[in-house]
């Protein structure tokens, strides 16, 4: 239990730094946007596994803003589902 240097990642919603285990990773590949993409290479972003962060991410379409590209609603649906599964 001595992991002092756990790498932190920033949630795109609340902009807090958190350990990866508390975050959902979203990756943009050339073909699609993958939610919960822990083992996929590509440009990644993180959202807290927290209903408030996920809701405001969906409401504000923050994935679109972060990627500066259109994002299908299904991506946001998946994000909500991942949050439910994480509980
Ligand atoms: Zn957050």
Image (spheres, helix red, strand yellow):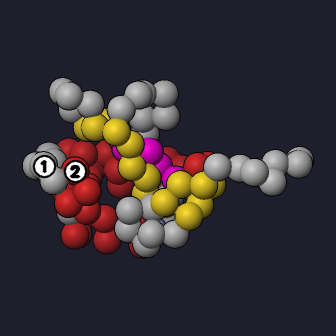
Using the rendered view, name the quadrant where residue 15 is placed. bottom left
Q: Classify mark 1: helix, strand or loop.
A: loop
Q: Is residue 31 highlighted in magenta?
A: no
Kindly indicate whether the residue at mark 2 contacts the one at mark 1 (C-beta within 8 angstroms). yes
Q: Residue at x 43, y 52 (%)?
A: 46
In this rendered view, identify the residue nearer to me: 66 or 72.
66
For disc 1, the marked residue is 69
Extreme residue toward the front, this view: 5
Total count of labels: 2
Where does residue 24 sit, x and y in percent of width and height? Answer: 47, 49
Extreme residue toward the right, this view: 1
87 over 60 or under it: above or below? above
62 over 42 or under it: above or below? below
In this rendered view, identify the residue nearer to me: 9 or 52.
9
For disc 2, the marked residue is 67
Where does residue 58 sit, x and y in percent of width and height? Answer: 26, 63
In the rendered structure, which segment of residues is drawn in magenta?
Answer: 22-26
Can residue 73 be seen here? The reply is no
Using the rendered view, name the quadrant where residue 40 is placed. top left
Instruction: Please rate how many residues cluster around mark 2, counting C-alpha atoms within 10 Å: few if below 14, some from 14 to 19, many from 20.
Output: some
Magenta segment, principal secondary structure? strand
24 over 29 or under it: above or below? below
Q: Classify mark 2: helix, strand or loop.
A: helix
Q: Residue at x 25, y 57 (%)?
A: 66
Where does residue 53 sit, x and y in percent of width and height? Answer: 41, 68
Q: CA distance from mark 1 to mark 2?
A: 5 Å
In this rendered view, identify the residue nearer to me: 78 or 17.
17
């Amino acid at each position: 239990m001595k992991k002092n240097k756990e790498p932190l990642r920033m949630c795109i919603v609340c902009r807090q730094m958190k350990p990866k285990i508390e975050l959902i990773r979203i990756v943009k590949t050339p073909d699609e946007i993958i939610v919960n993409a822990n083992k996929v290479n590509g440009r990644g972003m993180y959202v807290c596994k927290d209903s408030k962060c996920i809701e405001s991410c969906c409401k504000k379409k923050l994935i679109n803003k972060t990627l500066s590209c259109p994002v299908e609603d299904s991506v946001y649906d998946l994000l909500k589902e991942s949050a439910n599964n994480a509980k």
